[in-house]
Image (spheres, helix red, strand yellow):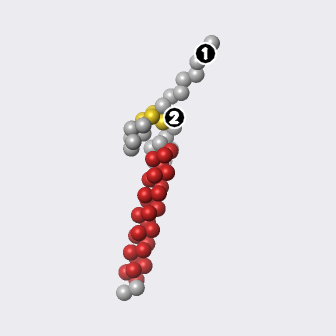
Amino acid sequence: MATATVRTTRCPRCAAGAERLDADLGVCLPCRDELRGELTSWLMQLVGLMVLREGR
């Protein structure tokens, strides 16, 4: 009887083992979602600063 092995790789951001990494970012899926949230927050702050500056 043959056994199937699941190959895991290490996420460079959190060092956890993952079955697959995001193709574009090279991190595990939970880290990808966390990065997406952080970048969205950062972008919203940047846009807010631009709006405040235009009000002058």
Whole-percent x, y for residue 53 in the image: 37, 81
Q: Where's residue 52, x and y in %?
A: 39, 80
Identify the residue at image location x=46%, y=52%: 34
* Residue appearing at x 45%, y 44% in the figure: 27
> In the image, what residue type sits under mark 2?
Glu
Where is residue 47 drawn, in percent x and y? 43, 72
Q: Amino acid at mark 1?
A: Ala
Residues tagged 1 and 2 counted as in contact (Cβ below 8 A): no
Q: Name the secondary structure under disc 2.
A: loop
Residue at far right of view:
1
Q: Quadrant of the C terminus?
A: bottom left
The dot on residue 2 is: 1
Q: Residues within 10 Å of mark 2 (few under 14, many from 20)?
A: few
Residue named by callout 2:
19
| Residue 46: percent from left, percent from top | 40, 70
Q: Is 3 positioned to the left or the right of 21 in the image?
A: right
